[in-house]
Image (cartoon, rainbow, N blue to C red):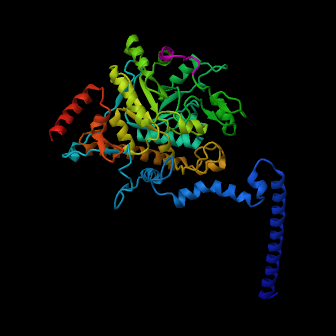
Amino acid sequence: MTFWHWAMMALQVLALLFVVAIGVVALAALAFYVLDKRQTRDAILRNYPVIGHFRHWFSTLGEFFRQYFFAMDREEMPFNRAQRDWIYRASDGKGNTVAFGSTRSLSIPGTPIFMNAAFPPLDDQFATTDPMTIGQHCRVPYNATSIFNISGMSYGAISKPAVLALSKGAKEAGIWLNTGEGGLSPFHLEGGADLVYQIGTAKYGIRDEAGNLDDDKLRAMAAHEQVKMFEIKLSQGAKPGKGGILPAAKITPEIAAIRGLRPGEDGISPNRHREVDDFGDLLDFINHIRDVTGKPVGFKFVVGSSRPWAKFFELIKERGDEYAPDFITIDGGEGGTGAAPMPLIDLVGMPIKEALIRIVDLRDKYGLHDRIRIVAAGKLVNPADVAWAICAGADFVCSARGFMFSLGCIQALKCNKNTCPTGITTHDPHLQAGLVVQDKYKKVAAYAKTTTKELEMIAHSVGVLEPRQMRRRHVRIVQADGTSVPLDRIVPSFHREEYEDGAESYKIQTQL
């Protein structure tokens, strides 16, 4: 047969396939038409059968098209492209310089602007941050070496390779990793990082069959040398007043065994700890865990109002400083999670920029500055975010979503569906294969190191030798009229050292 014969046969086959395809499409359209007209749940499909499906498809795809084609660098939520790109570059160890000028608007109320010194320290006068001890009253205090650390993300909410990459990266960078409320997995330990064991309201990993705290299991958990501290989670920013939610689709037999759950059932934590009805109970609970473990114990919560917490600090002074928590983690209402009801994720909880200052001031007002360490969390992912938190009074900053971006997160917003395309929040082996631990742990470490390095650069610029010397007077906050005011003028500090330094600084400014 000649070439032309083969060509004619191929064309006939293609024509036949085309006709068949048209027939299949026509039959599918007819089937959709009948189904759409008969269904009662959707008025659009009932009134506009077949073509009404395009509306749903375009609505679903809209968020992706906006991300890649239409949104400006500073427009996206919850994290814009500029924030994500900075993290991606930092994670790759690439240069993080930009050209031409800033794309950030400096006239938006609430924007922090750091006050560069007239004569900053020379490069050879630079100092790194000294380690800070947490839990000096404990049998086994923790000497924390890093300001910037990894916030709670539980195994179950995130995948095995994600946990392992975070643990190995944390070890490489010399920072701590919070386990999240899902218990301690072998992958947390395998990476070798310092760990903060989070005790959620369900007490996964350390509970008896009735869901109550089991002291023997708690003692066994504390026996792990890598477990340096215990954090009681009262609430988190994305869902204050509601416990953790792990959909059944994400609960494998291994996760069920670690948490003490039955496969096939949603993991729903109680909305609060049953043992804790008031501030006295909270102090009792903290001290019980500290007595059993011998290690520093703190708690994490979202501030609804700072007024009730004055009674908490008063109670500490009545009982004695030794009864105080060793640290307090403050999560902002803008915090994230794998799954939460929209009313809680959108509308409940004080933002970190207000909550942090209020709790810091209460701590300092009651003379507990050197006793209780403050950890800030909630959408703090870039060096400027961390620097602001340190200026406001935090001793440490933790981030979860920043480190998710370092793992390759693209903000697909599929965390609760077990279909995460980057393998971070899914237990689908096919999708997990995209997350290569030996590559990603280096990115985690690079992101942490770059954030700390640029935090130190900001500290150097404002005229101090290392970040923990930054104070509220070093940052200005843009007001509604476009002008900026030093933070220590807006919210004076109760900490004596900062108050005296700030008063002297204000005196000099007014003379000028």
Q: In which quarter of the view is residue 320 placed? A: top left
**Place of residue 4 in the rendered image (x, y in percent of width and height, measured from the top left):** 78, 88
Q: Residue furthest top?
A: 319
Asked if residue 23 is positioned above or below residue 304 in the image, the reply reads below
Instruction: Tell whether 207 sits left or right of 138.
Output: right
Q: Quadrant of the C terminus?
A: top left
Front residue (pair 62, 22): 62
- Where is residue 354 shown, x and y percent of the image? 41, 34
Residue 340 horizontal side relative to residue 289, left or right: right
Q: Position of residue 241 (x, y in %)?
A: 57, 28
Examine the rendered structure and indicate whether residue 68 appears above or below residue 128. Answer: below
Residue 276 belongs to the span the image colors magenta: yes
Q: Magenta region: which residues? A: 273-284
Seen at 59% across and 23% down, the residue is 206
Residue at image coords 60%, 37%: 340
Provide residue 107's location: percent of width, then percent of height: 36, 50
From the viewer's perspective, is residue 335 above or below residue 26? above
Q: Is residue 122 magenta?
A: no
State the residue lying farthest toward the front.
481
**Nearer-the-camera pick, 342 or 167:** 342
- Furthest residue in direction left, as rendered: 511
- At a point 56% along the width and 33% down the height, the residue shown is 239
Determine whether, in the image, residue 147 is placed left or right of residue 272.
Answer: left
